[in-house]
Image (spheres, grey):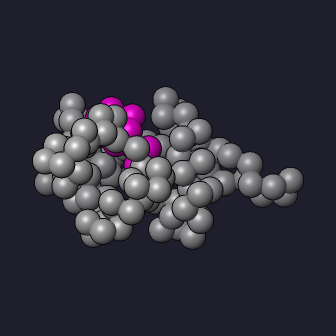
């Protein structure tokens, strides 16, 4: 994984339009490692923040509301292969963390 990705690079990795990505950042659903410090400066994504953004996007595409997807993405243990979380007394969902990481790596490398 590259050490850092710009906002533009993150949009490409996640397959999002600029407006959608900026809206998610503004609402706090996706958080850069280093926020932009004003006009003309760039936000930077690095390390786990890249994967958490990808998890958020995958959950949202899968039908989760943005608030819940952000909550789950922030709580996901990125050191395990599969992360399970409980939705209710009867329902649990799994995130294939390793597959999301591989998908990000493929998107970055071309």
Residue 4 seen anywhere in this rendered image of the structure:
yes
Main SS, magenta region, reads helix
Examine the structure image and report whether residue 88 is included in the region drawn in magenta. Answer: no
Q: In the rendered image, which quarter contains the C terminus?
A: bottom left
Along the horizontal axis of the image, is 93 left or right of 102?
Answer: right
Q: x, y percentage for residue 72?
A: 59, 47
Q: Is residue 62 left or right of residue 2?
A: right
Q: Which of the 4 quarters of the picture holds residue 44?
A: top left
Above or below, comparing residue 2 to residue 66 in the picture:
above
Q: In the rendered structure, which segment of residues is drawn in magenta?
A: 45-53
Residue 48 located within the stretch drawn in magenta: yes
Which residue corresponds to the image point at 51% horizontal and 64% vertical from the top-left? 60
Q: Is residue 99 visible?
A: no
Image quadrant holding the N terminus, namely top left
Q: Quick one: 49 or 58, which is closer to the camera?
A: 49
Q: Position of residue 58 (x, y in %)?
A: 46, 59
| Looking at the image, residue 10 lies above or below residue 43 | below
Kindly give the residue lying farthest to the front in the view shown: 39
What percent of the width, then of the height, locates residue 10? 26, 52
Image spot of residue 49 (x, y percent): 38, 39
Q: Residue 43 appears in which quarter of the rendering?
A: top left
Residue at point 39% right, 53% down? Answer: 25
In the image, 42 versus 104, the foreground residue is 42
> Which residue is found at the position 25% from the left and 39% from the top?
37
Q: Residue at x 42, y 49 (%)?
A: 30
Q: Nearer the viewer, residue 88 or 74?
A: 74
Labels in figure, total = 0
- Above or below, 67 against 39 in this view is below
């Amino acid at each position: 994984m590259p050490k850092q990705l710009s906002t533009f690079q993150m949009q490409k990795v996640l397959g999002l339009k600029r407006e959608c990505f900026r809206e998610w950042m503004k609402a706090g659903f996706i958080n850069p490692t280093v926020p932009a410090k004003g006009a003309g400066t760039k936000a930077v994504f690095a390390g786990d923040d890249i994967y958490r953004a990808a998890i958020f996007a995958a959950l949202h595409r899968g039908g989760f509301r943005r608030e819940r997807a952000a909550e789950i993405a922030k709580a996901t243990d990125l050191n395990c292969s599969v992360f399970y979380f409980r939705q209710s007394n009867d329902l649990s969902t799994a995130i294939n963390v390793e597959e999301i990481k591989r998908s990000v790596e493929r998107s970055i490398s071309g």
